[in-house]
Image (cartoon, rainbow, N blue to C red):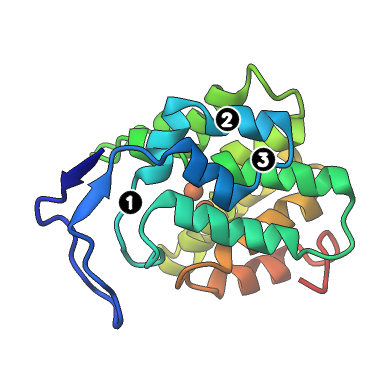
């Protein structure tokens, strides 16, 4: 259903066309067309009202000139599908993470003091837990933004020891499999007009643990 956007849509980018209406939810057929579900689980997720609502959330903003979550998902999916040298299973795992990782932004409460237990990654993990058994997929959904927060702590907030502490915890969570985390981080960050600095930072921090060609 189309609803007036009540002036919340502020154009900030050259070539940006104002969208005066936003959608409550993205129709399942539209999602099927752009996502091209590769498994029954992907198709099942696209049929869920929470996912359809989450995909419709978002207006053009810094880092995300594309606006709605579904447009970002399409960009990340394109990156995942063009990754070279990974197994079919890893590609399916990365696709699944892509579909869900930002889809609960609409349900996130960002009012201070921030309740980090309601981060969109945690909400997404809780939603798919009944359907997904893979620990690495669930962990990646939950922690997908953590490298960005580690980079921000060190570089922007000048808190290197806290950054190190959190980064070490992340390495522990993805013990022996940080290359998997990194692949997704690259696919997610090389979208929209996101700051590429965290990509350089992680390449240095995780040297020897990640694919050097990414
Ligand atoms: Fe995110
Ligand atoms: Fe994302």
Q: Is residue 101 visible?
A: no
Q: Which residue is mark 2?
A: 45
Q: In front here: 69 or 214?
A: 69
On the image, the x and y values in percent for residue 49 come to: 43, 27
Instruction: Characterize the local packing of mark 1: few (<14), some (14-19) or many (20 or more) Cα atoms within 10 angstroms.
Output: many
Identify residue for label 1: 58
Q: Residue at x 54, y 74 (%)?
A: 197
Q: Position of residue 118 (x, y in %)?
A: 40, 30
Question: As displayed, is residue 123 above or below residue 184?
Answer: above
- Please state, as top left, top right, bottom left or bottom right, where the N terminus lies in the image: top left
The secondary element bearing badge 3 is classed as helix
> Can residue 71 be seen at all in this image of the molecule?
yes
Residue 96: give its label: 3
Cα–Cα gap, marks 2 and 1 = 19 Å
- The circle drawn on residue 41 is none
Residue at point 56% right, 64% down?
A: 189
- Residue 59 at what x, y percent from top left? 29, 56
- Eye-nearest disc, 2 or 1: 2
Residue 118 to residue 204: above or below: above
Viewport quadrant of the C terminus: bottom right
């Amino acid at each position: 259903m189309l609803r007036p956007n009540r002036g919340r849509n502020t154009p900030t980018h050259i070539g940006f066309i104002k969208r005066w209406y936003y959608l409550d939810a993205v129709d399942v057929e539209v999602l099927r067309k752009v996502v091209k579900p590769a498994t029954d689980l992907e198709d099942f997720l696209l049929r869920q009202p929470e996912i359809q609502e989450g995909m419709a959330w978002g207006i053009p903003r810094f880092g995300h000139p594309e606006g709605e979550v579904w447009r970002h998902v399409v960009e990340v999916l394109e990156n995942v599908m063009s990754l070279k040298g990974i197994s079919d299973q890893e590609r399916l795992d990365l696709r699944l993470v892509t579909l869900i990782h930002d889809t609960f932004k609409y349900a996130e409460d960002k009012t201070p003091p921030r309740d980090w237990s309601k981060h969109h990654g945690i909400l997404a993990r809780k939603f798919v837990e009944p359907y997904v058994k893979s620990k690495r997929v669930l962990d990646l959904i939950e922690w997908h933004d953590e490298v960005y927060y580690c980079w921000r702590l060190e570089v922007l907030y000048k808190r290197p020891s806290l950054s190190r502490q959190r980064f070490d915890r992340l390495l522990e969570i993805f013990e022996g499999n940080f290359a998997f985390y990194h692949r997704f981080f690259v696919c997610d960050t090389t979208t929209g007009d996101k700051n590429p600095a965290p990509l350089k930072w992680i390449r240095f921090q995780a040297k020897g643990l990640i694919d050097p060609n990414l």
